[in-house]
Image (spheres, rainbow, N blue to C red):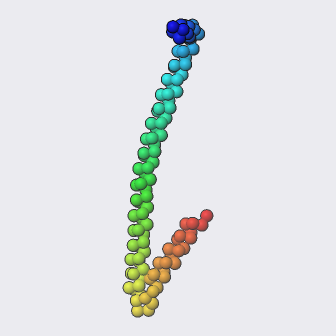
Amino acid sequence: MESKTKEKNQTSHSRVTGQSGWKDLVQGFVVKMLEQMGDDLAKRGHVWIKQLKRKSVGWILLASGTVFVLIALSIFINALTQDLFPWVGYSIVGVVALAAGYALTKE
């Protein structure tokens, strides 16, 4: 019985001061804002992971394609200079690849 009386007194006090309404309003606003932020972060995370997968596969294919093109170029140069120096095609392509890699990594 005492607890019912205390609840009644607290409820009537909060109605008079208006604290319960503002508190509920602010809590509702904050809860909705946090839910929307969480949903937005989850969507951004999914989009970022999807783009990362696509870019990773693209870079792998690009790297392997580059290797095959360089090998084909070196075999072609070897075919042109086979009588003189059979190793010159691989040497030229290797030196060009090293120079390009060095130039790209140098700041």
Q: Which quadrant: the C terminus?
A: bottom right
| Residue extending furthest toward the right | 107
Rendered view: 21 above or below 32: above
Q: Residue at x 53, y 15 (%)?
A: 21
Viewer-side residue, 38 vs 100? 38
| Residue extending furthest toward the bottom | 83
Locate residue 42: give its quadrant: top left
Q: Residue at x 54, y 73 (%)?
A: 99
Viewer-side residue, 63 vs 85? 63
Q: Is residue 11 visible?
A: no
**Where residue 90 appears, x then y in whole percent?**
45, 81
**Where residue 70 appears, x then y in whole percent?**
43, 74
Rendered view: 66 above or below 33: below
| Residue extending furthest toward the front | 1
- In this picture, residue 51 sits left or right of residue 6: left
Locate residue 43: give its quadrant: top left
Viewer-side residue, 107 vs 20? 20
Q: Residue at x 55, y 19 (%)?
A: 23
Locate residue 66: give its quadrant: bottom left
Count of picture labels: 0
Q: Is residue 14 visible?
A: yes
**Where residue 89 appears, x then y in whole percent?**
44, 82
- In this picture, residue 50 sits left or right of residue 95: left
Rendered view: 17 above or below 61: above
Q: Residue at x 54, y 22 (%)?
A: 26
**Where residue 20 appears, x then y in whole percent?**
54, 15
